[in-house]
Amino acid sequence: MYKKIFVINDHSKCEQTYKESIEYLETQPALEEKVATHIWTYRETADLVPQTTTNFGSGHFFPYAESVYEVESSCELALQGFYRQALAGLRSVLELGLLSVYFDVNDTAHIDVQNWLASLEQTPRRKKIFDRLCGLDTFRQFDRRFNLLQRIQDSFGMLDRYVHTRGYEHSGSALNRANFNRFSETSLKHYCDSLGVVVRDVIVVMLLKYPIGLQPLPLTSKFGLNGPVGGLLENHQVELMRCILEPSEKQYLQELSDQNEAVQRTVRHIEQLPDLSEEQWTQQAAEWEEQKKALLFKN
């Protein structure tokens, strides 16, 4: 009987691949910046998911939160040379990101997510997801102009080939040119390009549902440490999203946001609030310290 695990593709090969991946990206600053920016933007976009007294803690946030975990995991896998598994992870990112909006098309994610969240029903088929997303006027209009639906379907089709290992071309052996992990410039670049497409398109769908996402708001100066949780973004978060969008699509989405009266009412309301005084900042800081001490004492 064997007492120790022995595999051809041992961890030393993963470590060597990771080392070579990082060294390669350091010689390709534009590519490294692209990957870093897209992952950071995707993480920051989580703040756009509304958190209200009605839906807070309901589980409605789970699809997007899980997709953030998946995007980071897939990147780590790609750097270690698990290219096929990394691309399969991007498929989960795309599906979960779309599900986040799918459940909230009618602003009832806190209700509609429950059976799926509890594993009582299967993940909706893509046609059902697409049909429901098309229930958003903004999605239909954007799709007519930019062919978004076909773009997403094409991404699914490409990523499916790796999930199901559709022949040698879409296998780990082909991506590594070996039966163990090793660095491949072509495969890493393919992953990075795929990551960019998936992240951009999920964020576009998010902005079509939550157009306030392109309105930079002075949340810190107005609310201090006690700002709104979810649904609103600071300037640096909006700038991140703008920098990964295609110019023509960015202009369209910005106009959509600027012309939305509900969005503009919220913007005016927040901008008209007085900035916090120094005394209010000091009070908030003291209250946070007390809360931190209470939690430490409790634990």
Image: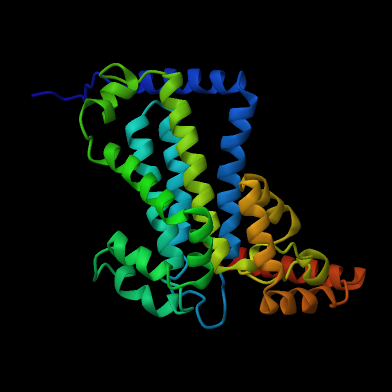
Residue at x 42%, y 47% (from the top left corner): 70
**Placement of the C terminus among the 4 image quadrants:** bottom right
In terms of image quadrants, where is residue 168? top left
Q: Position of residue 111 (x, y in %)?
A: 39, 80
Front residue of this view, candidates 57 and 5: 57
The answer to whether any part of residue 267 appears in the image is yes
Residue at x 58%, y 68% (from the top left corner): 210
Front residue of this view, candidates 164 and 70: 164
Q: Position of residue 116 (x, y in %)?
A: 31, 69
Give left or right: position of 166 versus 138: left
**Residue lying farthest to the left in this orientation:** 1
**Placement of the N terminus among the 4 image quadrants:** top left
Question: From what the image shows, is residue 186 above or below residue 198?
Answer: above
Give left or right: position of 91 versus 185: left
**Residue lying farthest to the bottom in this orientation:** 54
Q: Position of residue 121 (x, y in %)?
A: 24, 69
**Residue lying farthest to the right in this orientation:** 278
Give left or right: position of 175 versus 212: left
In terms of image quadrants, where is residue 265? bottom right
Residue at x 36%, y 68% (from the top left corner): 131
In terms of image quadrants, where is residue 66? bottom left
